[in-house]
Image (cartoon, rainbow, N blue to C red):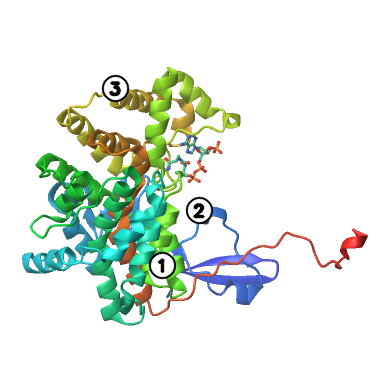
Amino acid sequence: MTESATFKHQDTELQFPVVHASNGNDGYDISQLLSKTGNVTLDPGFVNTASCESTITFIDGNEGILRYRGYPIEQLAEQATFLEVSFLLIYGHLPSQDELSTFEGKVSNRMMLDERMRELYRCFPRGAHPMQVLASGVMALGSFNRDTLDVHDPDQVEAASLRLIGSMPTLAAYAYKSSVGEPFLYPQKHLSYVENYLRLSFGTPQEEYEIDPAVVKAFETLFILHADHEQNCSTATVRMVGSADASIYASMSAGVNALSGPLHGGANQAVLEMLVKLREEGVDMKTYVSQVKDKKSGVKLMGFGHRVYKNYDPRAKIIKGHADELLRASGKSNALLDMALELEETALNDEYFIERKLYPNVDFYTGLIYEAMGFPAKYFTALFALGRLPGWIAQWREEHADPSRKISRPRQVYVGETERNYVPIAER
Ligand code: CMC
């Protein structure tokens, strides 16, 4: 017999079948609610609502567990490459050596942009935010690849997925180059995905760019840590836009825009700006934590708290472990890292944070690493987007492969004026 939960309101009694999870929260299937009761559920921010069944990423927020397709994030971050993880997310299994080499080759063939895309990038004003430029670039990529726009043709979806993954490092690097006014380089076939990305970002036409293997490894790890995170705001946006049969490029561009918000991916920029401001103004950590606790101050401790994690974010744990060694390798001063460590300790020992189970999230330490590599804070979120792209693509494809797929269209509980008559303007 199917397990179900009983819902009772006035004279109506309904059975909600329980949808069993292989890990984590089971769900109540409430699809009959509106037709049987005439009422809807109200759940602002979707705190209690699962929008889909998914096989891609599992998070246990209480235990601080994150797995892609069942594989623990710690093992992937330590042993896999970013393209291997991208393959895993999109196709559902770890690639064989042959599969990986073929995938890498296809991605590499798609790194170079149409020459007119470079012209497009030149039109953005100096100082434009790289996330604005990146979202526009991702959208424009669709118009340069019009034979990959049919969302019902699996070959075109595959071609678009490869085009997006291949072009994203170039799009992101050019967003950076355009904001600092430096010339664009072309990708090179003999370099790996991450090597290409670093050279496109930091190289100049004047001299050979020297690739530091420690930096390459760091970025492989950082991109893997960002590669998917189940139904977060940008991924839910990607699925929402995709549900209307909008193109995969339109859906990914929407994901970039959602990610740009400081409560989401934009937090990595906000954390660094917060630390720099505290240093400049000489604010000590205890004073800042007191400000944060005062709701009237409107100040938040950026890089802290998470909708799902009520424990240390496993990604932050891995990054924190690498931050010290990477900052040392970069020869940069560790002053900001020391501040971050002190801020974390102060917060973690404070009753406000303990009670609310607020821990550092992925964005707390990443900015320090990006800064040490030479990126300006405004660029950090574009790095998050580059890492998150395979997750968005995997989620978009999963949604499109679901036979029970419907356009995403939430309901509302209307609390506005009831019917009233129009008053001509002269009589108001
Ligand atoms: N600083 C101070 N108080 C906080 C913070 C914070 N960073 N985060 C949550 N709280 C408080 C919040 O005010 C609330 O207090 P009360 O119960 O007294 O009203 C309580 O903790 C629960 O927070 P919430 O706002 O209901 O939690 P949420 O799940 O709606 O929001 C969040 C999650 C990530 C938006 C929020 O924690 C936040 O704004 N953090 C700072 C921004 C940030 O670091 N974002 C990156 C998230 S991780 C990466 C990603 O998703 O891209």
Task: Count residues near mark 3 (Cα–Cα under 10 Å), then give few for <14, some for 14-19, many for 20+.
Answer: few
Camera-near label (3 vs 2) is 3
Q: Residue visible at 51% across and 56% down?
A: 46
Q: Residue at x 91, y 61 (%)?
A: 426
Task: Indicate which disc residue 335 carries.
Answer: 3
Query: Is residue 235 among what the camera can see?
Result: no
User: Residue lying farthest right?
Assistant: 427
Q: Which of label 1 and label 2 is nearer to you?
A: 1
- Which residue bears the numbered disc 1? 250
Question: Three-letter amino acid code at disc 2?
Answer: Val
For the residue pair 365 and 370, the one nearer the viewer reads as 370
Residue at 16% in and 41% down: 215
Q: Quadrant of the C terminus?
A: bottom right
State whether label 2 is within 8 Å of ligand 1.
yes
Mark 3 element type: helix
Instruction: Give the SS element for disc 2.
Output: loop
Q: Nearer the viewer, mark 3 or mark 1?
A: 1
Q: Amino acid at mark 1?
A: Ala
Q: Which residue is mark 2?
A: 47
Tell me if label 1 and label 2 are in contact, CB under 8 Å.
no
Nearer-N-terminus badge (3/1): 1
- Mark positioned earlier in the residue sequence (3 or 2): 2
Q: Using the image, determine if residue 176 lies above or below residue 364.
A: below
Q: Position of residue 112 (x, y in %)?
A: 21, 63
